[in-house]
Structure formats: C-alpha cells, structure tokens
Image: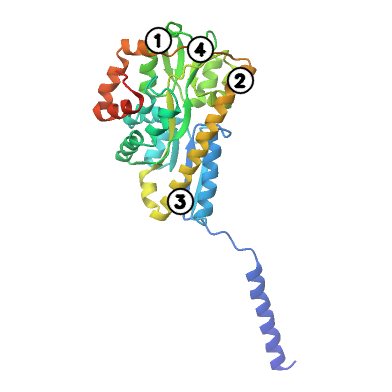
Amino acid sequence: MSTTRRHLMLQGTAMAAVAAVNLSPRRARAAEFNLRFGHGYPDTHPLNVRAREAAARIKDESKGRVVIDMYPNSQLGGDSDLLNQVRSGAVDFFSTGGLILSTLVKPAAISGMGFAFSDYDKVWPAMDGELGAYVRDAFAKSKLHAMTRIWDNGFRQITTSNRAIATPQDLQGFKIRVPVSTIYTSLFKALGSAPTSINLGEVYSALQTHICDGQENPLIVVDTTKFYEVQKFVSMTNHIWDGNWVLANGDTWASLPADLQGVVERNFDASAMDQRADILRLNTSLRDTLAGRGLAVNTPDSAPFKQKLRDAGFYASWQGQFGAQGWDLLEKYVGKLA
C-alpha cells in the first residue's frame, strides 16, 4: 500500500472517530446552584405541587443553572427543625405559616390574629400591600429573604373527636393541638382551651391516641393529612387566616446573581397566585367532601368568640407586643380590634 493511500485511510478513520464523538449524547452540565426546599406538607398539597412547577420553570429559564429539589412531608425534619435549617443554610428554601415563623420573626404572626380577617377581600390587599411589606422587612432583618407573594394556607377550622364547637363555652378545657407558635397557644388559652404544640407530621398519631381531642387547620390540610379518619366533627370557625411564606436563606439568596434572583422570585410568585386559586377552589368543595367522609359540619357565629378575646385582653396584649406600627397597619385593613 502506498504511503499516500495509507495516509488517506488513517485520515478518514480519524475523521470518523471525531464524528462519532460529536454524535454521542453530551453529558448534562452540572447545575451552578443545587438548592434544597423543605416543608411539612404532603406531596399532594397544592403548595408542594405548585412549588414543584415553579422549580421546573426555574430550571428551564435558568438553562439548568439553578436546580431546586423538593423535600415535602417533613422529610428533612418538622417545622421547628426546618426553620433552624433554613437559618443555618442546611436547607436553602423553607415554607410554612407565618404564625410558626413568628417564633423567630414576631411580625410574621400579625396576619394570623384571631378572628381579624373576615374574608379574602381583606386578606389580599393587606398581604400584597403595606402589611405584607412590613413582614418581609422583618424577615430580612433576620437574614431571611421572603418572596414577594405570600401563599395561601386558608382560613382555619376546628376538628374534634367528641363535640361540635358552637360557642366559646364548647372550648372550655378542650385539649386541642396547635402549631408551635405563641400566638396559637395564647389564642386558645384566652378561649379557655388546653392547647398543646405539636409539629404537623405528628398530629395524626396524637389525634388517634387522644393525646389531643381536636386540632385546627385549613380544610385542605384536614383532607390531605386524612385527619377525617380520626375526627368526627368540623366546625367552620374561620378563627385564623394564615399564609405560607416561601423563605430563602439569606446567604443562599445573596449568592445568586441578580438575573437568577429575578428568575427564582418571579416563578415562585407566579406559582403563589396559582396556589391561591387552588386553595379557594378546594376549600369551596371540601366542606361537602369531608361531610361525605363522615364529618359532621357546623358553622358557629364568630361574634361571641371575638368578644371573648376582647374580654380576656387578648387583643390588647398583642397590640402591645407588635407595637404601634404593625398594629396600625393591621387595623388599617381589618378595622378596630382592641
């Protein structure tokens, strides 16, 4: 074989090898930011469903630079643990109700004042307006970044195993589970109950074993956690509205370039609006759904409960704790409380 022919054959083999390499699947580039989002809600809860959608859009819009992995159902710990973890940076994102977050940032509880909000027509102007901005500023001072739009956790109702709640007298001495938050505890103590703070993931067993005879949560939580299996009554008290803040660890947030911060916040805020619609739609239908699952449903008058709180000094006490700025903003949207 001539030298020229051998050279051409070798050159052709090399070109084929290069072509084969170029045609082979490319290895996916590692994400620049691999982030973890933990929370206590079940996988099927609208918060988790919509947050997953936001994470998928964030990955797509950032061209794979930001990947957010979801850890629902207290996989990384209960609410108290996760709050500590998002502060330390062990998780990057965390979401729960403002009343639970108030154990660290007291102003987060102000939107959950007992019997303050009567309906969503008062909630969203306040939380998307000055009251929400006031709470976000308080988070920032604790080195946590709160997304602009709060997610809906719904109006809270009381479920029980042994009685319907129709008047404040029905709560006298009642053993009720509440989240780990001072405002919940003080609310039900002012109403004459015996509240016990338990993380969400442990509530089903506490109800099943009668450590508590009842609990209070939005209907969507009652449904997704299957509390209806261990409860007999649901009283539509609407005693608290609470929302879920999506929080980022301050150092994590600061590490993201401005363009990626925009991608993350914009998509979480868009999903917040979708989730609000989910909760409204679900809570409209869940009353009948839970009745069909065996829960007796009643709707008490809220006025006697509100008066009981005034008489017990509940509003006056919290007005002093929140201070004039926060309390004035709350009453701007809901009217006089104390």
Residue carrying label 4: 213
267 up-or-down from 120: above or below: below
- Of residue 197 and residue 323, the one placed in the foreground of this image is 323
Horizontal and vertical percent for residue 123?
A: 41, 29
**Looking at the picture, which amino acid does disc 2 mark?**
Asp
The answer to whether marks 4 and 2 mark residues whose Cβ atoms lie closer than 8 Å is no
Three-letter residue code for mark 1: Pro
Q: Nearer the viewer, mark 4 or mark 2?
A: 2
Q: Position of residue 51 (x, y in %)?
A: 51, 41
Give the CA separation, mark 1 to mark 4: 22 Å
Look at the image and tell me whether residue 257 can be seen: no
Please tell me which residue lies in front, 202 or 119: 119
Q: CA distance from mark 3 to mark 1?
A: 47 Å
Give the CA separation, mark 4 to mark 2.
23 Å
Label 1: which secondary element: helix
Query: Which x, y percent locates residue 238?
Result: 46, 20
Q: Earlier in the sequence, mark 2 or mark 1?
A: 2
Query: Callout 1: 10 Å neighbours few (<14), some, many (20+)?
Result: some
Whole-angstrom CA distance, mark 2 to mark 3, is 39 Å
Tag on residue 304? 1
Q: Which residue is mark 2?
A: 288
**Nearer the camera: disc 2 or disc 3:** 2
Q: Which mark sits nearer the N-terminus, 2 or 3?
A: 3
- Which residue is at 40% across, 41% downward? 148
The spot of residue 298 in percent (x, y) is 54, 12
Disc ID at residue 263: 3
What colouring method underlies this structural image?
Answer: rainbow
The reply to whether discs 3 and 4 touch (Cβ–Cβ < 8 Å) is no
Please, is residue 49 above or below residue 110 in the view? below
Name the kind of residue labelled 4 in the image.
Asp
